């Protein structure tokens, strides 16, 4: 599977609706929504109000990535605002199993994200309870950072773990430093969903940028 999810963190917030529509016209599959609290990551972005404001402007699913502490406090608000799937960080959840079930109780697919230094064992015991694993390919907090290549063996290992566990249908998402050069590498290593901020919203031609991330896309 190959899903491209442009991250609006790199969009122009003053014309967010236009940028989202441009990505949709350009062939994006999902819109990736990076929520930061200034505690879990050293940056602030936006919350449910912005998600709700953007919601009427696209039919694409909102893939909400919560880089916040105590995410359980905000799940209902993001669902209400129009999130279609929610991913929380394993490092931010004291009771991870409870949080992923809370997301699913709202009827949404649940994802668990792992920072570059967090081992796969952090997600091993919730594989039956989740729909996606997000392998961070940069340290979260900012767009435009460089891809960390140590993520590649981690992706291969996760793919094997899912197969061994009989959970092949769990999606593997990657986020950070994804561009036309790194896209083939992560896809070969097992990634299904590619998040890209700078590579899509940092250029004028979003359709060409998205096409370049697809299999055989690099010209
Ligand atoms: C990292 C965010 C990413 C980021 C990706 O903190 O979760 O979604 O915006 O941006 P690029 O593709 O520019 O590395
Ligand atoms: Zn993200």
Image (cartoon, helix red, strand yellow):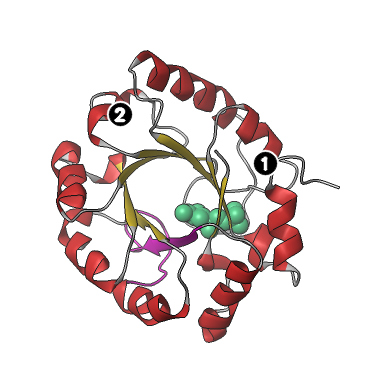
Q: Is residue 70 visible?
A: no
On the rendering, which quadrant does ligand 1 occupy?
bottom right
Q: Is residue 78 visible?
A: yes
Mark 2 and 1 residues: CB-CB less than 8 Å, in contact?
A: no
User: Does 43 appear in magenta?
Assistant: yes
Q: Which residues are magenta?
A: 30-47
Where is residue 83? Give x, y as percent: 32, 64
Q: Main secondary structure of the magenta part?
A: loop
Disc 1 is placed on an element classified as helix
Question: Disc number at residue 63?
Answer: none
Question: Disc number at residue 183?
Answer: 1
The residue under label 2 is 122
Towards the viewer: 214 or 175 = 214
Decide if residue 12 is on the left or right side of residue 115: right
Decide if residue 20 is on the left or right side of residue 89: right
Decide if residue 81 is on the left or right side of residue 158: left
Badge 1 density bin: few <14, some 14–19, many ≥20, Cα 10 Å: many
Where is residue 120? Give x, y as percent: 38, 25
- State the residue lying farthest toward the bottom: 14
Towards the viewer: 12 or 159 = 159
Disc 2 is placed on an element classified as helix
Where is residue 149? Give x, y as percent: 63, 32
Residue found 28% across the figure and 37% down from its top: 130
């Amino acid at each position: 599977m190959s899903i491209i999810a442009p991250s609006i963190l790199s969009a122009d917030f003053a014309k967010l609706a236009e940028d989202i529509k441009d990505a949709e016209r350009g062939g994006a599959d999902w819109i990736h929504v990076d929520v930061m609290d200034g505690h879990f990551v050293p940056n602030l972005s936006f919350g449910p109000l912005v998600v709700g404001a953007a919601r009427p402007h696209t039919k694409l699913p909102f893939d909400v990535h919560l880089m916040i502490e105590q995410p359980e406090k905000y799940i209902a608000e993001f669902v209400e605002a129009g999130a279609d799937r929610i991913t929380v960080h394993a490092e931010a959840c004291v009771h991870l199993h409870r949080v992923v079930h809370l997301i699913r109780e709202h009827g949404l697919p649940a994802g668990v994200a792992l920072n570059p230094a967090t081992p796969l064992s952090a997600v091993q015991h919730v594989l039956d309870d989740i729909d996606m694993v997000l392998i961070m390919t940069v340290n979260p907090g900012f767009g435009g950072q460089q891809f960390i290549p140590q993520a590649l063996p981690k992706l291969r290992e996760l793919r094997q773990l899912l197969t061994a566990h009989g959970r092949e249908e769990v999606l593997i998402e990657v986020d950070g430093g994804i561009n036309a050069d790194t896209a083939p590498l992560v896809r070969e290593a097992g990634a299904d969903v590619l998040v890209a901020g700078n590579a899509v919203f940092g250029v004028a031609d979003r359709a060409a940028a998205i096409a370049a991330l697809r299999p055989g896309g690099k010209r």
